[in-house]
Amino acid sequence: MSRCILMYLTIAGLLGWAGCAAAPDPEQTRPRKFKPIDATAATFWDRQTTESADLLRELAAEFNAQRQGLPIKVEHIGGYSDIYRKVAASIQARALPSMAVGYESMTSEYVRSGAVVALDNLLTDPEAGLPLKEIEDFFPVVLDTNRYPDFDNKMYSFPFCKSVLMLYFNKRVLADAGIDEPPRTWEQFLEQCRKVKAKTGKFAYPVSVDCSTVDGMIYSMGGDVVSGRETRFDSPEARRVFELLETLAKEKLAYQIPPGSYDDEVALAQDQVAFVLRSSSGRTALERLMGNRRDKWGMTTIPQADPANPRTVLYGPNICIFDTTPEQKRIAWEFVKFFTSPEVSVRWALGTGYLPIRKSAAEDPALQAFWAQWEYNRAGFDCLAFARTEPNLAGWQEVRGLVENAETAILSGIQSAQDAATDLTRAADAVLARQ
């Protein structure tokens, strides 16, 4: 059993969720109020670091200066798993921040405890909400991912930092292998990996084991990850992904990097590999690693089964607002609206590498100037039109760990692609069935 799954089961036990036959109606638990952890400020638990953290605090300060009342206070808690653990413990202690970042799979677990506020009424409120024109300005996919089918399809979180899975490529390594353009299909990807190995002796692709990457690859094959409450990891499209990973490992075209590391990005910058599959938000880190060598690398849509109908995965955290006091909830919602406004959305995108979540961002002069600086700067934004969300079903946090275990087993040769797909489907379906 992986550490990821153990962590999930431990937290589920803390919250009293393990073994539940069905998800309780969160509205039935709504009277169980939670007190704010800080009555003097609306606390926001986040995981941003370095320049991104500085910009977030700068934006919070601007928000505080524009209004009266409790200030927003940003607190760095650690990574997403750290925030998840702390929120779980705080739910037990019945004292919560005003809001926190987290993935949909995490928010699903918070909802089951009655700790999270549904945002539907706030969003459409004549005074406190957003006009229909503004709601329609959001890319539909960034709002859809925040509706939870297990809980009457209500909106229990709001988009915060969004990115898409991209293919990064090293032009020098490809040129040394006699390749002029990055692959558009997975068949071309495998062929180019073989050429890189044959012509240069280098590995082509360092693999960062990650459920979101697997989901994105399945989408790009034309498949789905779930159907209802059953997974599709044994579908022909999913099996093609697992077979590709198996082939890459067997032919020594790919290797697995240490979990949690960014060794793949370093290897790409040092001309040691040809490809990296990472979030579009990784562009800023690669720019720093590459220095001024913009002519030596690029980023593009991930390979596809059918390039005429592309797909990739949308990921990145959202903000959820906790059910504390009316004032804390009101201020948290005001900050969410401020942060996702068109102007701030563009500032955040330019300052962090995340994608602007508003369609109108395309008309912003600052963003247009940024796109004009390098031919690949717009690549991630253009993928929003066909990006797909990951499941936000209760139990998916545990399923993610199972997917990553299966991917590791394939890459290490412990299991065949076929056996891993079969076992993964059985185990993942069992997790979802007991929710």
Image: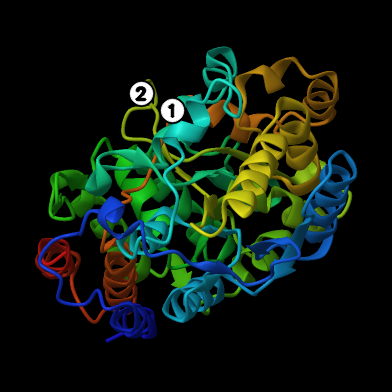
Q: Quadrant of residue 248?
A: bottom left
Q: Quadrant of the N terminus?
A: bottom left
Secondary structure, mark 2, is: loop
Number of the label disc, if any, that sits on residue 309: 2
> Is residue 426 found left or right of 163 in the rendered image?
left
The dot on residue 386 is: 1
Q: Looking at the image, can residue 59 be seen?
A: yes
Say if 7 sits above or below 73 in the image: below
Label 2 Cα crowd, 10 Å radius (few <14 / some 14-19 / many 20+) = few
Residue 271, can we see it?
Answer: no
Question: Where is residue 371 drawn, in percent x and y?
Answer: 77, 27
Residue at the spot 27% in from the left edge and 66% down from the top edge: 399
CA distance separating discs 2 and 1: 8 Å
Instruction: Give percent across and percent down for residue 229.
Output: 14, 51
Element assignment for label 1: loop
On the image, the x and y values in percent for residue 187 come to 34, 41
Mark 2: amino acid: Asn
Numbered disc in front, either 2 or 1? 1
Where in the figure is residue 314, as x and y percent of width and height? Answer: 47, 42
Say what amino acid the circle numbered 1 marks.
Answer: Phe
Q: Check if mark 2's residue and mark 1's residue have beta carbons within 8 Å.
A: yes
Mark drawn on residue 84? none
Res. 382 image quadrant: top right
Frontmost residue, 15 versus 163: 15
Residue at x 66%, y 67% (from the top left corner): 267
